[in-house]
């Protein structure tokens, strides 16, 4: 039985709104000073993570999902793509305002396997940073009219955030990350985005980025609803675990470790991102040093593992 954690190399995406915090704060070897995203646990074809260690070293996560389904407790008749995607985003400038479809719309209209429900753990935020989450339209007709008239200040719902905040963004929620915010995103493995508003920005040639108002209006939930999260805290040894969200696609927890804990695997597999501090992960007598910026999967087959150190994690599962 495979009993090693699977460490993954991030894939970087340069973006016009990106910055350099993925280097200055996370010490990644980024391609430019406008690096917006690190896809840190990804099997998506637009940026697949490569495995760094163990018998599958050099394979992509997507290849491991295909050829070693047992690592994920995947049933033999499961032909679906790897379901989740974890990113760190550094918004040096405002991201465009956007919305994602649900699974049914994504399959029917775009021919891709998944829509996109996502959530954000705020890693860093400048004082008074804001993001956009939802809107103030009461009916679909109001929404379409305000979009057509460009009444963005009236339409878009703004929310102030600070480090440690958690934001849940179900498919159909209009959203945008604002300048000065760094987040860890847990999402369905999808890259389908409908752009609603781009602040009328133009590129060096004077062109605006394309908008997708019709599809955006079609998939947007009206009126905006604030979801109930029922967050729960549990303590095991020196580990405090706060469940941030659990839905039909994923569960996400924040873990704070101050000492030592022995854990039993309960999920099919666990995705783990170290967001603060450093620690030692011990599995089957093997020790692995982990620190802020390390991302790994604990595969099916590992029954127990031990963590020791002073660190914080964002953990997710299917
Ligand atoms: Zn999004």
Image (cartoon, helix red, strand yellow):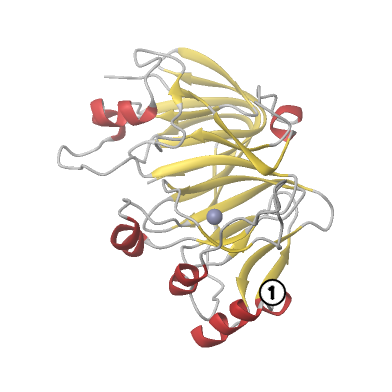
Residue 222 lies left or right of residue 71; in this view the side is: right
Question: Which percent across, then down, holds residue 1?
Answer: 26, 19
Residue furthest right as drawn: 127
Near-viewer residue (128 or 313): 128
Question: Which percent across, then down, holds residue 163?
Answer: 73, 49
* Element type where label 1 sits in the image: helix
From what the image shows, is residue 7 above or below residue 208?
Answer: above
Residue furthest left as drawn: 77
- Ligand 1 neighbours mark 1 (CB distance < 8 Å): no
Near-viewer residue (238 or 174): 174
The answer to which quarter of the image holds residue 304 is top left
Question: Which percent across, then down, holds residue 85?
Answer: 46, 42
Residue 101 lies left or right of residue 173; in this view the side is: left
Q: Does residue 6 appear in the picture of this structure?
A: no
Quadrant of the displayed image that contains ligand 1: bottom right
Q: Does residue 45 appear in the picture of this structure?
A: yes
The number of callouts visible is 1
From what the image shows, is residue 178 above or below residue 139?
Answer: above
User: Residue, x 41% and y 45% (percent of image)?
Assistant: 189
Q: Which residue is mark 1?
A: 152
User: Residue, x 54% and y 28% (percent of image)?
Assistant: 10
User: Residue, x 41% and y 29% (percent of image)?
Assistant: 298
User: Residue, x 21% and y 42% (percent of image)?
Assistant: 79
């Amino acid at each position: 039985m495979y009993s090693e954690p699977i460490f993954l190399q991030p894939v970087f995406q340069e973006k016009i709104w990106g910055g350099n915090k993925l280097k200055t704060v996370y010490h990644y070897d980024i391609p430019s000073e406008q690096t917006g995203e690190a896809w840190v646990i990804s099997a998506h074809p637009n940026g697949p993570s490569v495995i760094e260690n163990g018998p599958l070293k050099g394979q992509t996560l997507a290849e491991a999902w295909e050829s070693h389904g047992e690592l994920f407790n995947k049933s033999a008749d499961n032909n679906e793509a790897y379901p989740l995607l974890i990113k760190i985003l550094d918004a040096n400038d405002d991201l465009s305002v956007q919305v994602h479809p649900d699974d049914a719309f994504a399959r029917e209209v775009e021919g891709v396997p998944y829509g996109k429900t996502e959530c954000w753990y705020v890693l860093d935020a400048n004082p008074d940073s804001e993001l956009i989450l939802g809107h103030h339209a009461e009916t679909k007709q109001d929404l379409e009219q305000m979009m057509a008239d460009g009444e963005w200040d009236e339409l878009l719902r703004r929310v102030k955030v600070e480090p440690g905040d958690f934001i849940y963004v179900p498919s159909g929620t209009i959203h945008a990350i604002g300048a000065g915010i760094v987040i860890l995103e847990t999402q369905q493995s999808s890259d389908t985005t409908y752009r609603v508003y781009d602040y009328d920005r133009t590129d060096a040639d004077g062109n605006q980025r394309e908008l997708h108002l019709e599809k955006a209006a079609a998939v947007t939930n009206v009126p905006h609803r604030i979801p109930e999260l029922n967050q729960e805290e549990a303590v095991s040894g020196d580990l405090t675990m706060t469940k941030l969200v659990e839905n039909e696609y994923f569960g996400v927890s924040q873990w704070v470790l101050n000492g030592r804990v022995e854990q039993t695997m309960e999920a099919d597999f666990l995705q783990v991102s170290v967001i603060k501090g450093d620690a030692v992960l011990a599995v089957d007598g093997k020790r692995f040093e982990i620190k802020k910026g390390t991302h790994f999967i604990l595969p099916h087959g590992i029954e127990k593992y031990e963590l020791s150190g002073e660190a914080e994690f964002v953990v997710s599962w299917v």
